[in-house]
């Protein structure tokens, strides 16, 4: 008698597999939803007080991610089965035989991760994260012994077997032979419909962007947000974090790439004499701020705004009458505050620049993976936290983007707030693809500072805007000031329509920031508030930067600083100096913290120095590190390419001046030491004086 698998037609084999795929997918979704319900009931903090609608949003978003997970695990199996239909029946019959084994593997994996996530949550107060890989990276035997001693492993294995067996039985329930043949039209329609539905669920969204991590932020409450990812989804995110954040375990590997065998050798290149051990170099990489009498009398608020795509080159085409790119920011940039036009971003992306600004790190991403669970001595926030400041990070986007919520809290921020917190205060707030429009972030920041001031609190507020980003939308309530895209002439790299949209969001973001400063000034806060703003990178898509002659434009961003007169200490803004993101926090420390220990990094922009340079961690000419100064420029610090100034443009130089060579050596030493400092702390590797 022929085997039952072989006697069925190809379409009967496919139809039975299709039915079981969909049934098993639904079973998996229900399982994960029940595990989420158990997590909510058993692990919710006793004082949890959030609207029922937010819990409902967490379950709804979790359901969407669960569907995405099951479609991703099961969909490819059905897709390949469909591709086998034109082949002889034996191929799909064999594939059908293998289906049950794959279904068991999938559900064992889903169930196991769901169970692990439950106990992981109870221990770490959050879903599975990159720390789970410590099972293999720490003392594995000791970890396993701890798990065996502290958790009901045998009962969990029984539960795992029981859950999987029940699921397989439900999947096969109602099994029947499909005797009625389908015509090719109906069969083709069924196959296409099933595959399209699976692709849609696997994508998680019918909109322009698929469902992704940023959508997990459904509340300002961390526990509610942590309900969203199931065990499999949380493990997937943890795996991704781990893959993007591998760091060479040799603390000196970066130093060696920049040409120094030891940290002492790099220190000597900077003129630090008498340092004979790595520990001595480490101790030298801290500084003390000067005495600030005004800060001792009244600690000022400190505000830093990192503006999405706020590149400097568009400002060359600003015209208040016909092409207004500043709006209400104009008086602040032109005469109220200090504008530093010769500035470069530390990185060429939002997250690299954010990490460069906050941690002075050439290694990025640093805080997304397992290394984000370290605390770094380079944190720009820590000196404020240590001196009693309330430290707040605020963005109009999602706090789950790049795991900002968890990562920044570990590096000194008391609060990490995003669009959900803003919506709680301003239910009428509106936004676009990436979050709320910038005006709402600034309104929230204004309210936060006013309330803190009334309570006598001192606040460090770091803000990240998002509106000036594709798809370049502004709120309907905003009426742009006059704009003329034709002013850009041949430098325009986009279509006139796209270019006009970019200029609108550029203007809107600047106008919103200007309104924020106006409101603080009107409220009497600007006489005891330090403010700095810069762009995360250049303005994308609008202009082209074809070669090294545009190096300054390619990485150019504005830096705008306001230091109240009482806190200036007699300093004068060195607006003609070359500078970068690395100088922002050292400037703020020098005028807001009196005699405080701070990390070694950039310089105070209100104190003159010899041979100033803009030093960044950007990638150019095949390697990391860009330095621009009055003497010229250097790219790829590991294998330097030199440039000289010629009629205001940079040109390659095969015989650089002694001054440029000296600055290049110092730049390599600085970045090499910064790499060594971060890498050493990331891998927690002690060193001796021996090379």
Image (spheres, rainbow, N blue to C red):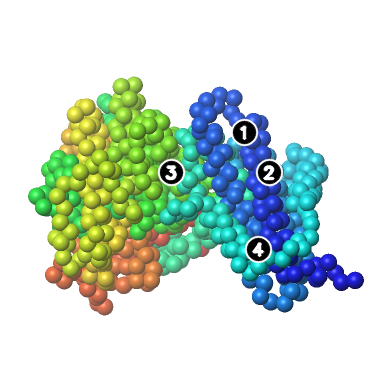
Mark 2 / mark 1, whichever is N-terminal: 2
Q: Residue at 38%, 34% (x, y): give it.
A: 422
Callout 4 secondary element: helix
Q: Earlier in the sequence, mark 4 or mark 2?
A: 2
Cα gap from disc 3 to disc 1, whole angstroms: 22 Å
Q: Residue at horizontal 64%, vertical 65%? A: 187
Above or below, 654 against 196 in this view is below
Q: Nearer the viewer, mark 4 or mark 3?
A: 4
Of callouts 3 and 1, which one flags the residue occurring earlier in the amino acid sequence? 1
Up-down relation of residue 622 to residue 313 (above or below): below
Q: Percent x, y for residue 151?
A: 75, 39
* Number of the label disc, if any, that sits on residue 31: 2
From this viewpoint, which residue is outermost toward the left?
321
Q: Which mark is residue 398?
A: 3
- Asked if residue 547 can be seen in this view, the reply is yes
Question: Between residues 8 and 273, which one lies in front from this camera angle?
Answer: 8
The numbered mark, 4 or 1, whose residue comes first in the sequence reads: 1
Q: How far across and how far down the image is residue 200, in percent? A: 54, 56
Residue that carries the numbered disc 4 in the rendered image: 78
Measured Cα–Cα span from mark 4 to mark 3: 35 Å
Residue lying farthest top? 455
Which type of secondary structure does the marked residue at label 3 adopt?
A: loop
Residue at position x 73%, y 43% in the image: 147
Per the model, the C-alpha gap separating discs 4 and 1 is: 34 Å
Q: Quadrant of residue 158?
A: top right
Instruction: Report the residue marked by disc 1.
Output: 40
Image coordinates for residue 598, horizontal then vertical, percent: 37, 42
Q: Is 47 placed left or right of 187 in the picture?
A: left
Q: Kindly identify the residue that appears in the image at 67 percent across and 39 percent down.
A: 34
Residue 157: percent from the left, percent from the top?
79, 46
Pointer 2: residues within 10 angstroms few (<14), some, or many (20+)? some
Spatial distance from mark 2 to mark 1, Cα to Cα?
A: 14 Å
């Amino acid at each position: 008698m022929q085997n039952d698998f072989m006697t069925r037609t190809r379409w009967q084999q496919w139809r039975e597999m299709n039915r079981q795929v969909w049934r098993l997918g639904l079973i998996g979704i229900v399982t994960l939803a029940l595990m989420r319900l158990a997590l909510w009931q058993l692990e919710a903090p006793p004082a949890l007080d959030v609207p029922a609608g937010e819990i409902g949003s967490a379950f709804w978003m979790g359901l969407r991610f669960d569907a995405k997970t099951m479609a991703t695990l099961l969909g490819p199996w059905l897709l390949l089965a469909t591709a086998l239909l034109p082949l002889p029946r034996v191929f799909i019959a064999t594939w059908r035989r293998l289906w049950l084994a794959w279904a068991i593997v999938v559900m064992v994996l889903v169930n196991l991760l769901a169970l692990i996530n439950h106990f992981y949550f109870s221990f770490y107060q959050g879903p599975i994260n990159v720390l789970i890989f410590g099972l293999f990276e720490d003392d594995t035997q000791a970890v396993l012994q701890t798990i065996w001693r502290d958790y009901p492993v045998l009962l969990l294995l029984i539960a795992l077997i029981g859950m999987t067996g029940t699921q397989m039985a439900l999947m096969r329930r109602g099994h029947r032979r499909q005797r009625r043949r389908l015509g090719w039209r109906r069969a083709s329609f069924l196959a296409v419909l099933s595959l399209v539905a699976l692709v849609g669920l696997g994508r998680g969204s019918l909109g322009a962007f698929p469902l992704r991590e940023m959508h997990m932020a459904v509340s300002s409450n961390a526990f509610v947000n942590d309900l969203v990812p199931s065990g499999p989804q949380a493990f997937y995110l943890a795996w991704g974090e781990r893959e993007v954040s591998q760091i060479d375990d040799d603390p000196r590997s970066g130093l060696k790439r920049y040409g120094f065998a030891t940290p002492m050798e790099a220190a000597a290149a900077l003129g630090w004499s008498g340092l004979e051990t790595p520990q001595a170099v480490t101790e030298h990489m801290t500084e003390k701020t000067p005495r600030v009498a005004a800060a001792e009398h009244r600690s000022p608020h400190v505000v830093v705004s990192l503006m999405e795509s706020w590149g400097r080159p568009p400002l060359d085409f600003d015209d208040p009458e016909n092409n207004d790119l500043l709006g209400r920011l104009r008086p602040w940039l032109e005469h109220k505050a200090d504008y530093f036009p010769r500035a470069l971003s530390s990185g060429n992306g939002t997250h690299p620049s954010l990490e460069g600004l906050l941690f002075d790190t050439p290694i990025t991403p640093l805080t997304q993976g397992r290394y984000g669970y370290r605390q770094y001595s380079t944190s720009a926030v820590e000196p404020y936290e240590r001196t009693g400041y309330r430290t707040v990070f605020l963005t109009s986007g999602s706090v789950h983007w790049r795991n900002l919520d968890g990562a920044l809290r570990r590096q000194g921020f008391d609060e990490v707030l995003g669009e959900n917190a803003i919506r709680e205060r301003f239910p009428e707030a509106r936004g676009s693809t990436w979050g709320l429009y910038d005006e709402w972030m600034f309104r929230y920041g204004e309210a936060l500072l006013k309330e803190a001031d009334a309570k006598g609190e001192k606040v460090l507020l770091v803000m990240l805007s998002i509106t000036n980003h594709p798809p370049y939308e502004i709120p309907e309530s905003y009426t742009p000031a006059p704009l003329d895209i034709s002013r850009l002439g041949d430098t325009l790299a986009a279509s006139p329509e796209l270019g006009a949209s970019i200029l609108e969001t550029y203007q809107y973001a600047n106008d919103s920031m200007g309104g924020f400063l106006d409101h603080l000034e009107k409220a009497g806060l600007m006489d005891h508030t330090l403010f700095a703003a810069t762009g995360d990178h250049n303005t994308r898509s609008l202009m082209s930067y074809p070669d090294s002659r545009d190096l300054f434009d390619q990485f150019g961003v504005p830096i705008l600083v306001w230091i109240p007169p009482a806190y200036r200490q007699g300093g004068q803004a060195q607006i003609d100096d070359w500078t970068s993101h690395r100088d922002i926090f050292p400037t703020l420390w020098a005028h807001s913290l009196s005699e405080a220990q701070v990390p070694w990094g950039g310089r105070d922009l209100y104190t003159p120095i010899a041979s100033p340079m803009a030093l960044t961690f950007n990638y150019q000419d095949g390697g990391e590190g860009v330095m621009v100064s009055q003497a010229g420029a250097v790219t790829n610090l590991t294998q330097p390419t030199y440039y000289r100034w010629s009629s205001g443009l940079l040109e390659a130089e095969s015989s650089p001046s002694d001054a440029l060579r000296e600055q290049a050596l110092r730049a390599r030493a600085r970045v090499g030491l910064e790499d060594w400092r971060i890498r050493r702390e990331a891998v927690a590797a002690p060193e001796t004086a021996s090379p």
